[in-house]
Amino acid sequence: MSEIEFSKDEKEIITKKIQMYFSEELDQIIGQFDAQFLLDFFSDEIGPYFYNRGLYDAQSILEKRMESITEAIYEIEKVTEFKK
């Protein structure tokens, strides 16, 4: 798996959200460096779990769509003497 990377702008937005969370929910003020450090930790250690869950969800949707396509193909199949 490739490493999860965010753009500079994305990191800035996420870092601010972390700082806001700490301030509003925990009554703690953390600096930008600490928030960035926390983001890096979650990206490296927790991010793969979310990434994999997204892959599993996408795979499930794809399987359902493939079943639907297969059914649609059977519906338009013409009757012949040949059987599969």
Image (tube, helix red, strand yellow):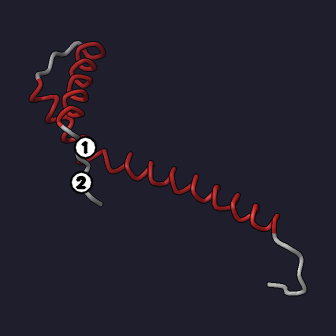
In front here: 67 or 18? 67
Counting from the top left corner in percent of width and height, residue 14 is at: 25, 29
* Contact between labelled residues 2 and 1, with CB atoms less than 8 Å apart: no
Neighbours of disc 2 within 10 Å: few (<14), some (14-19), many (20+): few
* Closer to the eye: label 1 or 2: 2
Neighbours of disc 1 within 10 Å: few (<14), some (14-19), many (20+): some
What amino acid is labelled 1 in the image? Ser
Left or right of 14, for residue 75: right
Left or right of 35, for residue 55: right
Q: How many marks?
A: 2
Q: Earlier in the sequence, mark 1 or mark 2?
A: 2
In the rendered view, tell whether residue 4 sits above or below residue 11: below
Counting from the top left corner in percent of width and height, residue 47 is at: 31, 45
What amino acid is labelled 2 in the image? Glu
Q: Quarter holding the N terminus?
A: bottom left
- Kindly identify which numbered label has been placed on residue 3: 2
In front here: 75 or 26? 75
Q: CA distance from mark 1 to mark 2?
A: 9 Å
Tell me the SS state at disc 2.
Answer: loop
In the rendered view, tell whether residue 24 sits above or below residue 44: above
Look at 89% across and 76% down and name the residue there: 79
Tell me the SS state at disc 1.
Answer: helix
In front here: 27 or 18? 18
Look at 85% across and 73% down and name the residue there: 78
Look at 21% across and 39% down and name the residue there: 7
In the rendered view, tell whether residue 48 sits above or below residue 33: below
Look at 79% across and 68% down and name the residue there: 74
Counting from the top left corner in percent of width and height, residue 32 is at: 12, 25
Name the residue carrying label 1.
43
